[in-house]
Amino acid sequence: MSTGKKEKRKAGRPKKDKELKTNNILRIALKSFAQKGYGGVTINQIAKATGVSDSLLHHHFGGKKELWQKSMQLIGKEIHGELADLFKLIDDLDGLEKLRLYNKKIVQVSAKYPEFQQVVVQEVFSDNPRSAWLIDELLQPIFAPMQNIIAVETAKGRIKDIPAANLTSFIIGSITTLFTRSFQMKKMHGIDSLDPEQIDLHVTLINDLIFNGLLKK
């Protein structure tokens, strides 16, 4: 029998719903930046893509620069969180095994978040405030574990002493290019880079090629 009283909404639910909606807007915005580049995107275009008014986007996110930063921060935080969870599990493993598993995770997150990698590729070619912010705030924390492992294993004499800029660019480039150029891979080689089988194959090949080149004989 109804008492006529309205049931109270559980505490925290509106906030959670708001977070989900905010994150969805940021993911759609990131896709736009990845597809068209920073200069090719307007707040009005993102508003139409998300079904939110221009004024509401400005109110919640600020201008285009802030929206770009927040969309990259969302994915950067998720990637960093996945890496943090990984290193909690592999903390006691041998350094080279850590590097193998780190490379595997970077392949997986590159496939999971291709738009993030596409924006990175667009931005880091030039010296500008966006690229400097991107490197300092997001890329350094993501790639620091790899650089630390390599430094330790190099000091032990287990891997070749290769200049950091050359080695990290080789590893990062070889991992991410398959996904940042997914259309090229499909057009030229007839593969879907984001297919799980292709991702698993890439993990195997990347570690095989990298370690064959890195390890001292």
Image: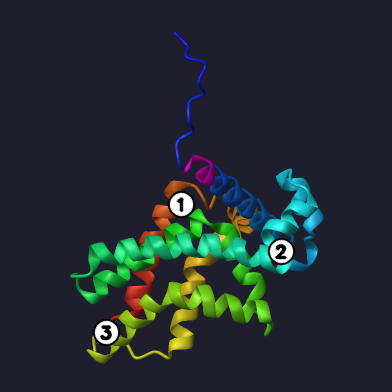
Disc 3 + disc 1, Cβ < 8 Å = no
> Residue 39, relative to residue 26: is it above or below?
below
> Helix or strand or loop: what does disc 1 sit on?
helix
Pinpoint residue 112: horizontal percent, then vertical percent.
Answer: 49, 54
Residue neighbourhood size for the residue with mark 1, other residues' Cα within 10 Å, grouped as few (<14), some (14–19), many (≥20): some
Q: Residue at x 49, y 70 (%)?
A: 174
Q: Is residue 58 visible?
A: yes
- Asked whether 106 or 177 is in front, the reply is 106
- Mark earlier in primary sequence (1, 2): 2
Q: Residue at x 20, y 73 (%)?
A: 94
Relative side of 184 to 159, left or right:
right
- Label 3 vs label 1: CA separation? 29 Å
Residue neighbourhood size for the residue with mark 2, other residues' Cα within 10 Å, grouped as few (<14), some (14–19), many (≥20): few
Relative side of 93 to 99, left or right:
left
Which mark, residue 62? Answer: 2
Pinpoint residue 168: horizontal percent, then vertical percent.
Answer: 45, 80
Range drawn in magenta: 12-16
The amino acid type found where label 1 is placed reads Gln
The amino acid type found where label 2 is placed reads Gly
Residue annotated with mark 3: 153
Residue neighbourhood size for the residue with mark 3, other residues' Cα within 10 Å, grouped as few (<14), some (14–19), many (≥20): some
> Residue 89, relative to residue 24: is it above or below?
below
Q: Is residue 180 visible?
A: no
Q: Residue at x 52, y 46 (%)?
A: 15
Q: Is residue 52 magenta?
A: no
The amino acid type found where label 3 is placed reads Glu
- Indicate the quadrant where residue 51 lies: top right
> Helix or strand or loop: what does disc 3 sit on?
helix
Residue annotated with mark 1: 198
